[in-house]
Amino acid sequence: MSEAQAHSFWRSPVIWPLAGILALVLANLLHDRSVAFLSVTVSDGHLYGSLIDIFSQGSRCMLVALGMTLVIAVSGVDLAVGSIMAIGGALAAILLTQHSAPLVLAVAAALAVTAAAGLTSGLLVAGLRLQPIVATLILMVAGRGVAQLITDGNVVTIQRPGFEFLGNGYLIGLPFSAVLVAVLYLIVNTVLRRSALGLFIEAAGDNETASRFAGLAVARVKCLAYVASGFCAGLAGLLAASNIRAADPLTSGTNMELDAIFAVVVGGTALTGGRFSLLGSWIGALLLQTLTVTMYNLGVAPAVAPVPKALLIIGVCLLQSEKSRRWLGGLWRKPV
Amino acid sequence: MKTSSRRNLPLFATAVIFAVLFVCAGVMYDGFFSTRVLVNLFTDTAVTGITAVGMTLVIFSGGIDLSVGAVVGFTTIFTATLIQKHGVHPVLAAASAVALGAALGAFMGTLIQVFKQPPFLVTLAGMFLARGAAWWISTESTEITHPFFVHLSGYAWEPGGGLRLTVAALAVFAALAVGYVIAQHTRFGRNLLALGGSEQSALLMGLPVGATRIGVYTLNSAGAALAGIVAAIYSGSGNPSQGVGLELDAIAIVVIGGTLLSGGRGHMLGTFFGILIFGTIQSALLFDGRLSPAWGRIVVGLLLLGFILLQRIMLRGVSRRGDGGSFLKL
C-alpha cells in the first residue's frame, strides 16, 4: 500500500463507522450462533427483522444528526435539539388532541415553531456573536420548560391513525420513518453539493473572517444551519411522539444532543467545523443504533447502555486527535 | 478605577437582582421574609450549590463540565450500596466515592489537556460514563439505615435565634468558603483565571497550564462527589437517577453570578448570589403552588440570557476586540 493510499484510507470518514457496524453485526452473529440477526422476513407485505428495526428506530438520531452536521460544519454546536424535540412533539400532540386540528396543520405548526426555535439560537450565535454552546444552552434549559408548559406537564397520548403512520407506518414494505429520513438526506446532500451552499457552509465554518472578506454572508449561512437543526429536531420529535403514540415533554429527546454529536463526529465531521460528511453522519447514527441493539441482544441491561457508548465516544475522539494520529502514523511507517 | 468598577458590575447586578427578587417574593407571599426561608434557600439548593462552586473554578479556566450531575447520582448510589450491602463504614464509603470522583476528573482533564479534545465533549462522555455506572450498580434507589448516617440526616446546628442549619446548609457554606479562598487567595486560583483569559499568555508566563487544567477538573469532580454525599445525607438514600440536568442549573448559577462563560473573569461571591437567586426562584414557585415548575426552568433560562447579554455589552465596552471567545475555547 503506497503512502498516499494509506493516507486516504486513514482519512476516509466512513471506513471506521462501517467497520464498527460490521464488528457489531459479527458480535451478534457469534453470540446467537445463528444468522437470526440478519434475517428479514416479509409479513403483510412489510419487512420485519433486527436490521429493519435498526433503520426505523435509528431514524430519529439520523434526523437530528442531519441538522447537527450542518451546525457543526459552521463551527457551532446545538445543545438544544433534545428540548426542541420535546417542544415539537408536545405542540403537535396538543393541537391534535385538544384542538382536533387537521394533521397537516398540526405537523406544519410544530415544524414552524421548532424551526423558529432554531432561528432564535441562530440569531444569538450569528447576530449577537454568543458562543454556540452558551446560546443553545439557554434554549436547552428554557425549552424543556416550554414543552412542559405546552402540555401542562402531562404526557399526552395521541390516537390518530394518520399521525401514527409517521413513526410506525410502512411505505413500499419499508418503515416510513427510515424512508423519510433517507430521502431527506438525499435531498439535502444534493442541494448542498450541487449548489454553492455546501461550499458556503464549509467556508463559514473554516474561516469566518476570510469568508466575510470574500463577501459571504456568514451570519445568514450560520442562521440557516441552526434553522435546519431546529427543523430536523422538530421532525424527530414528531417521529418520537408518533412512535410511542404519546408526547412526553420531560423525557422526549433526553441525551439526544450527545447521540447526535456522537453520530456526526464518528462520521468524520470535524468538531472544529469547515468540512462535513452527511453520509458519515448517517452511518454514524446507524452505528449508534446498532450498538444499542447489540447490547440488548447480548443481554446488557438498558440502564448500563451509556457506559459502552461513552467508552466508544472517548475512543473515537482519541483516535481522531492530532496526537494519537501522530503516534499511530509513526507505528504505521515503521519497517516490519 | 473605572475598569475595576466596571469589572464588578455583574457582581453588583447579581446582588441587586437577588435583593429585588427576594423583596418581591416577600411582598407576594406571606411568611417569605424569615430567616428560616433564607436558610432554606441554601438547604434546598445545597447539592446544586456545591457543584456550582466547583463549576465556577472550571469556568474560570475557560472550560465546562457537564458530568457533575451524573457524578452526583453515581456517588449517592455508590455510597448507599457500600454502606447497605457491604457493611462499609459511611466515612470510608464517602472517602472512596470522593476518590473515584477525583479519578474521573483527572481522567477527563487529561483527555482535555493532553489530547486537546473539547471539554464539553469529553465531559459529556464522562456524564454517560458516570450515569451508566450508577445504573449499573442499581436501577432502584436504596435507603441508608446506618445509624451514623441517619444521625447526620437528622442533625442540625442551632446557633440560636430560630436559626437551624442542617448538614446540607453547612456543607454549602463550607464549600463556598473553600471555593472563595481557592479562587481569590491562592496561586492556583490566579492561574485558573490566567489560563481562562489566554492560554497562550499563560504558557508564555511560565504558568503550569497542564497541571492547572487537570487539577481543576479533578477538584471539580471531587466536589461533585462531595455534593453527591450531601445529597445522600439530605435524602437519606442513594438514587442513581439523582442529579439529571443538574449541570445546567450549576452553569446557570455561575453565569448568573457574573462569571464570564468564556473564562478568565469572575468572582466566587457572584456564585454565592447566584445560589441565592436560584434558591429564591425555586422557593417562590413552591410558595405559590399555582405556577407549574416548568416556569422555574424558563425563568432560569431567561436570567441566563439576560446575564450573557449584559456580559456581551460590557465586554464590548472594555475591549473592542470583538468576539471574546471562539467555540474551540469552550
Image (cartoon, rainbow, N blue to C red):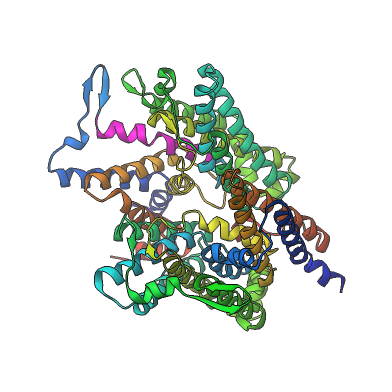
Q: Nearer the viewer, residue A256 or A275?
A: A256
Q: Quadrant of residue A316?
A: bottom left
The number of numbered discs placed on residues in the rendered structure image is 0
Asked if residue B59 lies left or right of residue A262, the reply is right
Q: Nearer the viewer, residue A182 or B12?
A: B12
Asked if residue A28 lies left or right of residue A3, the reply is left
Q: Main secondary structure of the magenta part?
A: helix
Q: Position of residue B11 (x, y in %)?
A: 74, 66
Q: Would residue A62 be counted in the magenta stretch?
A: yes
Q: Position of residue B238 (x, y in %)?
A: 37, 63
The single residue placed furthest to the right in the displayed view is B2
Quick check: A3 above or below A139?
below
Q: Would residue A294 be counted in the magenta stretch?
A: no
The magenta stretch spans which residues? A49-68
Q: Position of residue B19 (x, y in %)?
A: 74, 62
Residue B262 visible in the displayed image:
no
